[in-house]
């Protein structure tokens, strides 16, 4: 959500005098001689607060700090000293000294406890100093009138969300909306917190003046994938979000006729060239691009995490540009200077995306791929890379930008075999002789309807267990409570603690059937499950996110594991659990080279992707 900046200092007019001359001289107050410094003390002694504010407001930060501190040393008993302390805090915060700023704001509150702005800024200074608990306490102490309370509830909710306290974050965000329900950013975060906490029904927030329809529309791009199985609605949600958050650039940089290069210049833009699922999927594609026909550029705004996959991705590019510190305009101009023919955005609308770069249209052809599985209604994007299973032709008109359909499955993968540790059911707390259903997706993807379907399945399969990944205490607790309320034994719902990627993949070999979520299917996790020989049952919907697992399952030759109704999904899961021969057949199919020759054929996938690039290079707009 957008966060309000600390209040700015006030500036009051005053006559020019000797002090003004000193402030305007080279070096400012730091260049004063000892005699001049003594004269400065005299000037400050006779200076009113209004005069101080005027001079400090025109001074460089270092000089302003000296003026405020010097004046306060001489006027500590002045009843208006809180004003000097407040503005000193603003300057210290702006100068990167939040610890000293926190002291200044604390002094303000000691002199004027009702100055709520100082309490807000104190919390921000404490947060910036890493003292998050103190920041939360500071904000709670100064709950003022409606507008300031709204801001404080927003800050509390944001920080609690970051800290993982999802339950309390929901309460704070709801409190902000009770003051003013017309806050789309707060609505978005509240919906996603309720999704993450399995707080169902997600849209039943009970806020006067805020309908479920409005809350559902302002759920944000990520929330929309797990809430709505309607690509047209997802498109409109994203278009509204983009219009509010990322304004259009003042000019287009790319030539409309495109560039004329012997090799097609493809640029990949991402904030996830690090230990992230996207990098694991795309690394081999970058390595296998045909360098006789393509020149590959990387534009990176990712954290420097020192991971093996980051080093591998960087090495795969012909040219690698760090654009994290650059403004959107500067990054876009770098891409334009490189004369990129096709720019591939690998974020879409995920966290940290540099949508503002794309708005400058630095390349004549721009496409979005892999990071966000849904419409990205950005006018400067030309294509959304998918396939005919994920986006069938009859639904293509519901998407923006236009779908670019690859031959075969849309998802890139890495053919390199992972080195996995040995794991046992006993080590993972699983019964040796039970049928194990599993789902390792984040809990925000688990809807009330899907969890009810899973409980129906387990009720018909005595002795079977459901194995989920631990997510957060709020969702873990709610799922467990609903499970036992349904009459299912608590020990039949097992939560797996989070582990490193190698052990996570090895775990798939311990389960019998992966139960997919809908409307937001598993993507990378689904591919990992199939690769490790675990059959996956998916429920197909209308939207890209609700069909991506269907694309994966179809690609490996198991269309019988795609259900098209909730009833069919439940019946198929029960049938597999009750039929050892059918389970053995599915596992035998995957135990061969089904994954390796389809999803794992990185060379073949790269050639199909390059064929699509050749097609779209000829149609810049």
Image (cartoon, helix red, strand yellow):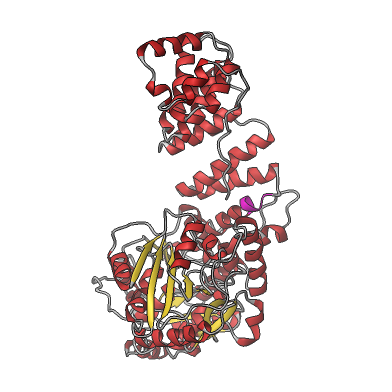
Q: For this rendering, which residue is in front, 7 or 393?
A: 7
Expressed as whole percent of the image width and height from the top left, the position of residue 251 reads 60, 62
Q: Quadrant of residue 140?
A: top right
- Magenta span: predominant SS is helix
Q: Determine if the magenta segment contains residue 205.
A: no
Q: For this rendering, which residue is in front, 147 or 565?
A: 147
* Above or below: residue 250 compared with residue 524: above
* Above or below: residue 368 compared with residue 74: below
Expressed as whole percent of the image width and height from the top left, the position of residue 173 reads 60, 46
Report the number of numbered marks. Answer: 0
Which residue does the image show at 35% across and 63% down from the upper left?
275
Residue 503 in view of the camera: no
* Above or below: residue 216 compared with residue 367: above
Expressed as whole percent of the image width and height from the top left, the position of residue 499 reads 32, 62
Q: Tell me the magenta residue range.
A: 183-187
Residue 608 in view of the camera: yes
Expressed as whole percent of the image width and height from the top left, the position of residue 107 reads 50, 20
Which residue does the image show at 62% across and 58% down from the upper left?
247
Q: Determine if the magenta segment contains residue 184.
A: yes
The C terminus sits in image quarter: bottom right
Left or right, residue 488 beside residue 375: left
Q: For this rendering, which residue is in front, 401 or 184?
A: 401
């Amino acid at each position: 959500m957008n966060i309000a900046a600390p209040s700015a200092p006030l500036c009051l007019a005053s006559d020019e005098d000797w002090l003004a001359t000193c402030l305007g001289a080279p070096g400012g107050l730091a260049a004063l001689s000892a005699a001049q410094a003594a004269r400065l003390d005299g000037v400050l002694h006779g200076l009113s607060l209004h005069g101080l504010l005027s001079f400090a407001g025109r001074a460089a930060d270092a000089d302003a700090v000296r003026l405020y501190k010097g004046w306060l040393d001489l006027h500590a008993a002045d009843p208006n000293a809180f004003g000097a302390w407040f503005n000193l805090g603003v300057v210290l915060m702006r100068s990167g000294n939040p610890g000293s700023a926190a002291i200044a704001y604390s002094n303000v509150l000691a002199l004027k406890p009702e100055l709520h702005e100082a309490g807000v800024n104190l919390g921000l200074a404490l947060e910036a100093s890493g003292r998050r608990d103190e920041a939360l306490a500071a904000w709670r102490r100064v709950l003022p009138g409606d507008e300031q309370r709204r801001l404080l509830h927003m800050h509390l909710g944001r920080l609690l969300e970051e800290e993982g306290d999802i339950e309390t974050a929901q309460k704070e965000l709801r409190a902000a909306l009770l003051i003013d329900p017309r806050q789309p950013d707060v609505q978005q975060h509240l919906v996603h917190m309720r999704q993450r906490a399995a707080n169902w029904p997600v849209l039943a927030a009970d806020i006067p003046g805020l309908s479920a329809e409005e809350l559902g529309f302002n759920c944000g791009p990520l929330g929309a994938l797990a809430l709505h199985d309607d690509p047209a609605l997802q498109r409109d949600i994203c278009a509204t979000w983009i219009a509010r958050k990322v304004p259009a650039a003042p000019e287009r940089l790319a030539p409309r006729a495109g560039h004329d290069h012997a090799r097609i210049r493809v640029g990949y833009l991402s904030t996830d060239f690090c230990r992230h699922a996207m990098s694991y999927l795309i690394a081999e594609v970058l390595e296998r691009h045909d360098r006789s026909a393509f020149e590959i550029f990387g534009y990176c705004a990712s954290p420097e995490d020192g991971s093996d996959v980051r080093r591998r991705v960087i090495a795969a590019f012909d040219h690698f540009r760090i654009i994290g510190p650059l403004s959107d305009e500067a990054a876009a101009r770098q891409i334009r200077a490189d004369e990129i023919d096709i720019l591939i955005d690998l974020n879409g609308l995920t966290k940290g995306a540099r949508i503002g770069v794309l708005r400058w249209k630095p390349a004549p052809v721009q496409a979005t791929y892999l990071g966000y599985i849904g419409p990205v209604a950005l006018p400067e994007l030309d294509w959304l890379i998918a396939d005919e299973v994920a986006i069938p032709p009859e639904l293509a008109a519901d998407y923006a930008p236009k779908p670019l359909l690859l031959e075969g499955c849309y998802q890139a993968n890495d053919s390199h075999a992972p080195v996995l540790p040995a794991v046992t059911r006993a080590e993972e707390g699983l019964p040796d002789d039970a049928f194990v259903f599993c789902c390792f997706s984040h809990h925000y993807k688990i809807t009330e309807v899907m969890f009810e379907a899973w409980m129906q399945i387990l009720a018909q399969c005595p002795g079977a267990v459901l194995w989920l990944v631990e997510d957060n205490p709020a969702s873990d607790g709610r799922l467990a409570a609903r499970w036992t309320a349904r009459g299912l034994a608590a020990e039949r719902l097992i939560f797996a603690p989070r582990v490193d990627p190698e052990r996570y993949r090895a775990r798939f070999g311990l389960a019998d059937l992966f139960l997919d979520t809908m409307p937001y299917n598993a993507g990378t996790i689904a591919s990992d499950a199939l690769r490790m020989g675990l059959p996956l049952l998916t429920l197909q919907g209308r939207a890209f996110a609700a069909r991506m697992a269907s694309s994966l399952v179809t690609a490996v030759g198991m269309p019988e594991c795609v259900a098209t109704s909730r009833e069919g999904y439940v019946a198929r899961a029960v049938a597999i659990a009750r039929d050892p021969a059918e389970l053995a057949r599915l596992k035998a199919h995957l135990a061969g080279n089904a994954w390796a020759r389809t999803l794992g054929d990185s060379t073949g996938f790269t050639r199909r992707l390059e064929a699509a690039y050749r097609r779209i290079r000829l149609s810049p707009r």
